[in-house]
Structures are given as structure tokens and as C-alpha cells.
Amino acid sequence: MNKLILIFSVLLLPILGNSQNMRRDYKFGQNISVFGPTYLSYSIDYFATPNINLEVGVGTKGSHSRSRGVTTGGIFGGLKYHFFGNKEWKATPYIGFYASKLLKDDIESAHKTYLLLYAPIGVQYINSKTFTFSFEYGLSYIPYSSNRNHYMIDLFKAGESEYFPNFSFKVGRRFGNKTQREERKKEYKPIRV
């Protein structure tokens, strides 16, 4: 059993261990993602704290819904909570919540936009060159009232709302304050195994 723990620790150390907290030192980021709230998107994000990440973006055409047709694109915004974000780990799991306003590519429709809610769980990895890689799996939800002028009580009306699974792969780059990073590097002690 001890050998198994040792092997597991040695394999995970390059992924988890880091000499600085990348989420604290590199607060701003920009990303390109495939799928998620839209099918192909560009977003910017900001770590308000090492655990809380805020993100806004724009995306292109996709087909999110059988009954609502094809979309030409849209905007989205949301937040993610990174578990262990305050640790000096390169990879952290997270959960999030996003809202998207998508434009329909349907000339005959009376409603040109609809709301899509997206709740992902995923893992973000930041390498030492500040490139990020994320993979997430989530549930997308199109409320009943997003296509009609009803009250919130109708949000979950049976037969009209749609749920469907979704996933996303994201690549990006982090940016931060060089002076603060160099001051913090002086404080860090190397991780010893």
C-alpha cells in the first residue's frame, strides 16, 4: 500500500506541485474554447481570488437545441469556483455557472434570441509558461420562459424546457503583474519530496 501511495505521489507531483500560485500571480487570461456555452468562442477571465474566476466571452454558430434551431452566435458570462485554487498547484478542479444569450438563425421566428444556462465541472491546468488547458463537462439548460414572455414560475414547465449534456475544451494564456510576481518568488520555498 505504501508503494502505491509513493508511486501516486510521484506521478501527481509535476501536475500539482508548483513554486508559485499561478492563479494569484496571473489574474488575467484570454481563452479560445470549443463547445461549452457556444460552439467556438473567445473569452477573457479574471481571478478575483485564487478560488473565484469570472469570465465573459462571445461565441459563434452552433446547434444547441432541437426545438430552437441553429444559432448564429451569442454572448456569455459566468463564474467558476476552483477547489484548491489557493494552493500552489498547477491543476485545480472547479465547478461553475454560466448564462448565455444566443441569437437564432431563423428568419420566421418571432423570438430572435434565447437563454442558455450552463453548469460545468472541470479541471484547469496552468503550465510554467502561463498557458492554460481546461476540460469540462456540464449540463446545458434552456428554460421554458427564455422563448416567451412568461414569469419565472414557468421556467421549469414540463415539456418546454430542455436539458442536454455538454463539454468544452479550452486553451488560453494568463497575464499578470511582473513586479508582484518577482517579489513573491523571493518568498517561495521549493517543494521538497
Image: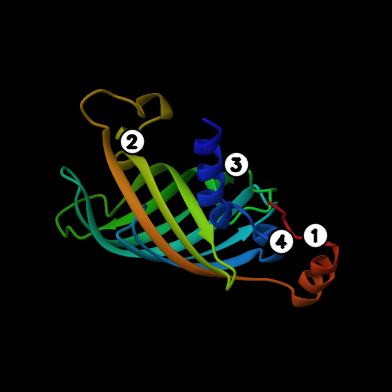
Task: Report how far apart the C-alphas of labels 2 and 1 lie in the structure.
Answer: 50 Å
Q: What residue is at 51 percent from the left and 44 percent from the top?
A: 7
Q: Residues within 10 Å of mark 1 (few under 14, many from 20)?
A: few
Q: Nearer the viewer, mark 2 or mark 1?
A: 1
Residues at circles 1 and 3 in contact by the CB criterion of under 8 Å: no
Q: Is residue 13 above or below residue 94?
A: below
List x then y, in percent, for residue 19. 70, 61
Name the residue that disc number 2 marks: 143
Task: Report how far apart the C-alphas of labels 1 and 3 lie in the structure.
Answer: 23 Å
Corner quadrant of residue 25: bottom right
Q: Is residue 139 above or below residue 23?
A: above
Q: Secondary structure at mark 1?
A: loop
Mark with earlier residue (4, 2): 4
List x then y, in percent, for residue 92. 55, 48
Q: What mark, if any, has residue 20 been given in the picture?
A: 4
Pick the front one: 152 or 98: 98
Q: How many marks?
A: 4
Q: Secondary structure at mark 4?
A: loop
Name the residue that disc number 1 marks: 189
